[in-house]
Amino acid sequence: MTDQEVIWTRLGLGTVAALGVLAVGCSADTETTAPATDALIAQTAAGSTDMSSPSAASGEGEGGVTIAKAATDPVVYLSALAIAKAHVLAARDAYAEGETDAAGEMSAHPVSEVLADMQPVFEARGVADFTALLLDASDAAYAGAPSDAIAKRTEVIVTALRDAEAFAPTDGRSDDAVWAGVVSDQIDRAADMYGVAVGSYQYEPYLDGYGFLKAAEAAFAEHRTAIETSQPRAAAAMSDALSQLQDAYATALRPETLDANPSALKAIASRVQLAVN
């Protein structure tokens, strides 16, 4: 049995099916259908490593990350890590709100949606495999562990993701330019997912978007000074976008009504993209 089969056997077909549903929330430009989930399970049984999302067949991973570019493009590489971070932060906060099943699914989600495709890149760059950390966090959530135990596991995963950031490729761009691209990417995903959430009664799209917001906030907070110095217009647009997204995603729990304007959120996200050099 391959390592990939071991991972998916441990997750179980129920979780695989749940991850197939979650892919709807995480790929705003891709519609996932039951056959797509069936194909995912079939690929799993065959031991395929290209099973992250319906867009994987075109060489893209979670939410349109072009995995083929991750080995050479630091923004793509770091955005993939930010997506994983978004999921574990969302899982932590959802768990604290009593959403144990959603937290368990969200913690495991990056294993299929990001790491399966990124693993060759990580291996080539010498990044330690942190799949087990995500599965452990998922197991703990399903087992009803105390919230502080989930929070501690989240800290360990975030540390592993930070360690992986140090192995990002370089292409001549400055660190502030690269991180501006990552912040913009996460903002755009959060805005996209709000639009998906408005058109769905499912919790997962909203929680995905909440996670992308949290990942964007974390990256901007860490690199804000450098971005403001080199790209003040972009930094101002990011600050405005994050403020509006914070109002839209006020809590990890989906409110009864989603009152923010999806078009307005997408417009401010687009302004960020245009402002980033």
Image: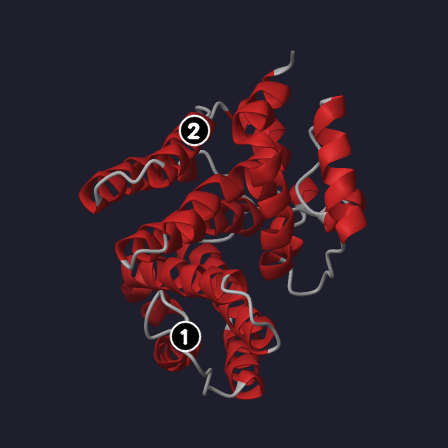
> Under tag 2, what secondary structure?
loop
Q: Quadrant of the N terminus?
A: top right
Q: Quadrant of residue 104?
A: top left
181 left or right of 113 in image: left
Looking at the picture, how far across and down is residue 112, in whole percent?
Answer: 59, 38
Mark 1, Cα crowd under 10 Å, few <14 / some 14-19 / many 20+, is many
Q: Position of residue 228 (x, y in %)?
A: 33, 71
> Crowding at label 2, few (<14), some or many (≥20) Cα neighbours within 10 Å?
some
Task: State the residue position of label 1.
Answer: 238
- Residue at the spot x=18%, y=44% of the render? 148
Q: Mark yes or no: residue 62 visible.
A: yes
Q: Which residue position holds label 2?
A: 130
Asked if 193 appears above or below 176 in the picture, the reply is below
Which of marks 1 and 2 precedes in the sequence? 2
Q: Is residue 71 visible?
A: no
- Asked whether 34 or 213 is in front, the reply is 34
Q: How is the image coloured?
A: secondary structure
Do the numbered discs 2 and 1 sit on residues whose CB atoms are within 8 Å?
Answer: no
| Amino acid under disc 1 | Met
